Image (tube, rainbow, N blue to C red):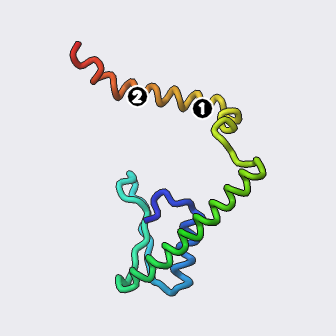
Amino acid sequence: MLGGVPDDEADDIRALLDGAGIDYYEVPASFLGVSPASLWLHNSAELERAKALIDAYEVERAMRARSEYDRLRQEGLHKTLPDSLKAHPLRTIAYIAAIAVILYLSLSPFLNFGK
């Protein structure tokens, strides 16, 4: 499934399957988001091989991301929550206000139920 996967990761998985000679087709996400974008194999006999390739890729990608994060942290260049708040204070206030409104609208029927 490709739902929520960054474009570069989806491209890498497509290239991985192409390089291994695994025949697949892609189904785009539905209009209303009921079903996510996904990759399907033409031959179900290749499922285990495809899973093994993708699992190995995911482990390697996680190790790369972790080492990049550790490098940035050691150099003091990684982003923290306070950095994001300083960079975009109005956006942060808008998000907090939107969350508060949604919580109020969601919970007010239950809080006022017995009145």
**Where residue 93 sits: x, y (%)?**
59, 27
Question: What residue is rendered at 40% in x and 84% in y?
Answer: 46
Residue 92's disc number: 1
**Where residue 27 sits: x, y (%)?**
42, 68
- The answer to whether 85 is drawn above or below residue 72 in the figure is above
Furthest-left residue in view? 114
Disc nearer the start of the sequence (2/1): 1
Q: Is 73 displayed left or right of 24 in the figure? A: right
Furthest-right residue in view? 75
Q: Is 40 displayed left or right of 21 in the figure? A: left
Q: Is 60 displayed left or right of 109 in the figure? A: right
**Where residue 22 sits: x, y (%)?**
47, 84
**Amino acid type shown at disc 2:** Leu
Q: Residues within 10 Å of mark 1 (few under 14, many from 20)?
A: some
Q: Which residue is mark 2?
A: 103
Question: What residue is rendered at 51% in x and 26% in y?
Answer: 97
Quadrant placement of the C terminus: top left
Question: What residue is rendered at 27% in x and 24% in y?
Answer: 110
**Amino acid type shown at disc 1:** Thr
